[in-house]
């Protein structure tokens, strides 16, 4: 699986917050009584962005298990939580792998767990899905294989857990001003998205459709909604990193086209520098729950 640096995750977090479907977040939150203790499993948690987005939208008593394979990202998580929480008047306490986030309307327990879910869905210390009534992930589904996704859906079903899967890339990229190679680059990027990211051949842009099929087949009610990034001049650094990443991915799969791709990259970056670039990157959110 490709590794994600803390700086990249921090850079994209603001765009993620603006993009996410508030309708689907409310739909999931409404499944639980306000006085319930919510037991949440967050897969591929990174530095905890999903917690930071969801904590204040869910019932206030929460206990999270935060799973990631990368110790660097997990080590960054407490600092990111403090940077987020303190300006909101929240108290962040704890040491080791446990944190407690408290406020006037929040008691949120966080337990970090390093596990490689690409090879072991249960993890070394047992079933991390057991007893969870909500399973979440963000920016993950397009990286996984059909086989992994089906196994993941079955584990959610065994726990009777509701599911919220945010920000799955859906293959759409729109660039303005247009360049002649835009569509070619998009096609190459989408081809690269379906290469192995550590979970087997990745689903890429088809992932949200596959997820709907998997969860519907297990008796879930499923809703989907757009969560597109809309990036203008105020997101210059994110645009630059996206363009660099797209060019790198396109070169990796586009044999014989490196000079054309590099020329495209130069022109796209010039639009960003001039403040005239606008990018729309298509994503979808998916919420799923069992009828009671």
Image (cartoon, rainbow, N blue to C red):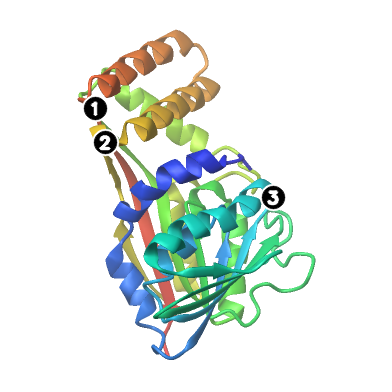
Q: Is residue 227 visible?
A: no
User: Of discs 1 and 2, which sits in the foreground?
Assistant: 2
Q: Whole-Å distance between the Cαs marked 1 and 3?
A: 35 Å
User: Going by the image, does 7 lie left or right of 70?
Assistant: left
Q: Please, which residue is most extreme toward the right here? A: 124
Which residue is the site of mark 2? 234
Q: Whole-Å distance between the Cαs marked 1 and 2?
A: 10 Å
Q: Secondary structure at mark 2?
A: helix
Q: Position of residue 26 (x, y in %)?
A: 32, 74
Tell me the quarter of the image containing the N terminus.
Answer: top right
At 41% across and 44% down in the image, what residue appears?
12
Q: Position of residue 39 (x, y in %)?
A: 55, 79
Which residue is the site of mark 1? 277
User: Going by the image, does 37 lie left or right of 225?
Assistant: right
Which of 196/51 is in front? 51
Which residue is the site of mark 3? 71
């Amino acid at each position: 699986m490709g590794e994600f640096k803390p700086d990249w995750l921090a850079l994209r977090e603001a765009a993620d917050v603006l993009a996410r479907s508030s309708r689907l977040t409310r739909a999931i939150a409404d499944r639980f009584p306000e006085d319930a203790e919510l037991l949440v499993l967050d897969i591929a948690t990174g530095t905890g962005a999903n917690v930071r987005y969801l904590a204040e939208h869910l019932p206030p008593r929460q206990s999270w298990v935060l799973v990631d394979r990368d110790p660097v990202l997990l080590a960054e998580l407490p600092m990111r939580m403090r940077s987020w929480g303190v300006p909101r008047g929240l108290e962040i306490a704890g040491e080791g792998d446990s944190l407690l986030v408290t406020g006037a309307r929040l008691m949120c327990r966080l337990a970090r767990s390093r596990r490689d879910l690409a090879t072991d869905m249960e993890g070394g210390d047992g079933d991390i899905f057991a007893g969870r009534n909500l399973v979440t992930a963000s920016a993950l589904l397009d990286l996984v294989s059909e086989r992994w996704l089906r196994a993941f859906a079955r584990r959610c079903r065994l726990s009777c857990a509701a599911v919220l899967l945010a920000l799955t890339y859906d293959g759409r990229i729109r660039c303005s001003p247009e360049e002649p190679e835009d569509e070619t680059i998009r096609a190459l990027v989408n081809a690269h998205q379906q290469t192995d990211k550590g979970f087997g051949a990745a689903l890429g842009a088809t992932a949200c459709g596959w997820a709907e099929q998997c969860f519907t087949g297990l008796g879930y009610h499923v809703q989907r909604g757009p969560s597109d990034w809309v990036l203008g001049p105020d997101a210059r650094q994110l645009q630059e990193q996206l363009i660099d990443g797209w060019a790198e991915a396109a070169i990796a799969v586009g044999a014989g086209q490196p000079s054309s791709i590099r020329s495209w990259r130069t022109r796209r970056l010039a639009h960003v520098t001039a403040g005239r670039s606008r990018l729309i990157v298509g994503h979808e959110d998916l919420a799923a729950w069992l009828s009671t």
